[in-house]
Amino acid sequence: MRCVIVIGTTGSGKTTFASALANRLGFPHGEQDAWNHGPNWQMAPLAQFRAQVSLFTAGESWVMDGNYSKARDIGWARADTLVWLDYPAWVVYPRIVRRTLRRVVTRQELWNGNRETWRGALLDPDSPLRWFWRTHWKRRKETPEVVARFPNLTLVRLIRIPIKIGRI
């Protein structure tokens, strides 16, 4: 396990898990959200985002989190392990609510000066509170098919308890 991708639905704990794993292994950690969200929540140009993923994953060992399909052909092809945080909705959604409330109230900076706001959290269709409902079950259904296209990956699927480890 030298090059690891951590995926999961919004609020599943990808960044927290990936950061802790990278620290434990002594590997660099890359966060795709930080590369994707420029100042004022502007999406990074595709070429710039892909270049960042390519640069980071060119290293000998790393842990990277994120679900971005627009650079999957780079990161997933270079990884040897994929950790899928596949937790049930009843576990994840309360985490999103607590995290969003904390970020809004404390004005926590996320990436490139961006902060969550009440308005954004409640009205933006791409806010984590709303994005979850559009993507959680869809990703649970589609992920095994996508992973199967990358035979280089050892899949570690965390579904709560018990933990299921294996290849698809």
Image (cartoon, rainbow, N blue to C red):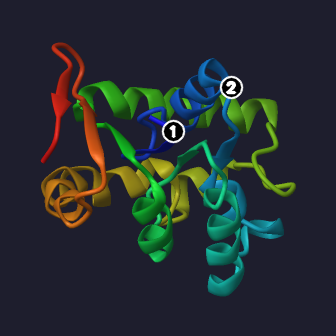
Q: Position of residue 38 (x, y in %)?
A: 77, 68
Name the residue rendered at 55%, 25% in the picture.
21
Q: Position of residue 143 (x, y in %)?
A: 22, 56
Image position of 59 (left or right of 69): right
Q: Secondary structure at mark 2?
A: loop
State whether residue 21 is above or below residue 11.
Answer: above
Image position of 19 (left or right of 112): left
Label whose residue precedes the other's in the sequence (1 or 2): 1
- The outermost residue toward the front is 60
Name the residue rendered at 36%, 34% in the picture.
93
Residue located beneath label 2 in the image: 26
Between 18 and 108, the residue placed more toward the observer is 18
Q: Position of residue 128 (x, y in %)?
A: 49, 50
Residue 139 figure quarter = bottom left
Between 78 and 30, the residue placed more toward the observer is 78
- Type of amino acid at the residue the image marks with label 2: Gly
Q: Secondary structure at mark 1?
A: loop
Residue 12 figure quarter = top left
Measure the C-alpha gap from mark 1 to mark 2. 10 Å
Q: Position of residue 37 (x, y in %)?
A: 70, 65
State whether residue 134 is above or below residue 87.
Answer: below
- The outermost residue toward the right is 113
Name the residue rendered at 42%, 73% in the picture.
73
- The outermost residue toward the top is 161
Residue located beneath label 1 in the image: 2
